Amino acid sequence: MADIKIKLYDLSGHSAGETVLDSAVFGVKVKPEVVQQVVVAQQKNSREVIAHTKGRAEVRGGGRKPWKQKGTGRARHGSIRSPLWVGGGVTFGPTSDRNFAVKINKKIKQQALTMVLSDKVANDRLVALLDYNFPEAKTKLLKKSLDLLPGKNKSTLIVTASAKDSIVLAAKNLPKVMTINYGSLNVVDLLNYDYLVISQDLLKKVSEHYS
């Protein structure tokens, strides 16, 4: 496949030449059905089980038989924990031991990721920076740079190498900006943000990690 070249920017929004992308990661044909499959799986795997009803073994009370078996004229009952009683256990209610997780083939997952990355490149939504060398970890400095780059005022995902990077601290107070480690890139986050910002050295690491 032919080399893919995209524009390289500095922190002032000026052109800093071009950089070559790995076509095996950034030049893949997009198959929507594959991307959808991975998105659905990722959403199911991140779903939290909230609703929970107590069964008869979990409700309080009912340690003894409410009345004797015979002679009272009333129906037989062994425990007030019975679902027949108000305040008793619930039969067939939702419980926290439900599992919504689904398995997704690692190869399919990786293919979908490269497809979404390729789509960002094809639609000029991937912004490559020369470096992240900000003089200080200041939100104001990052906001100023992002305003000078393509995707001003759009939601932006910034790829980082470490949680200790200064750009991570600078991005915390920007409502439409999120940072993510290059090894944690995933389809859902890439789709949720309009633009992807990444430094030149991290482009190489992404290529090595996902190719």
Image: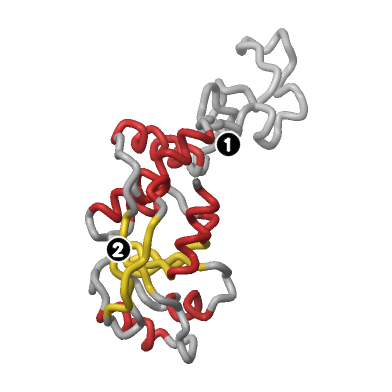
Residue density around tag 1, few if under 14, some if 14–19, many if 20 or more, within 10 Å:
few
Q: Mark number for residue 171? A: none
Q: Earlier in the sequence, mark 1 or mark 2?
A: 2
Residue under pointer 2: 6
Please give the name of the residue rendered at 31% of the width and 85% of the height, measured from the top-left corner.
12
Give the crowd class for mark 2: few <14, some 14-19, many >=20 residues within 10 Å: some
Image quarter hosting the N terminus: top left
Judged from the image, the secondary structure of the residue bearing numbered disc 1 is loop
Type of the residue with mark 2: Ile
**Is 168 left or right of 29, judged from the image as shown?**
right
| Residue 119 drawn above or below residue 57 | below
Task: Say which residue appears at 30% left-offset and 63% top-offset.
Answer: 6
User: Based on the displayed image, in which of its 4 quarters is residue 115 positioned?
Assistant: top left
**Residue type pointed to by label 1:** Ser
Which residue shows up at 47% across the image and 91% down it?
135
Quarter occupied by residue 113: top left
Q: Position of residue 88 (x, y in %)?
A: 59, 29
> Which residue was labeled with disc 1?
96
Q: Secondary structure at mark 2?
A: strand
Q: Is residue 153 left or right of residue 145?
A: left
**Percent position (x, y) of residue 189?**
40, 54
User: Residue 129's x, y, as percent?
Assistant: 38, 73
Which is more foreground, mark 1 or mark 2? 2
- The foreground one among 206 and 66 is 206
Residues at marks 1 and 2, CA–CA distance in whole angstroms:
48 Å
Name the residue nearer the viewer: 162 or 63. 162
**Residue 71 place in picture, x, y as percent:** 71, 8
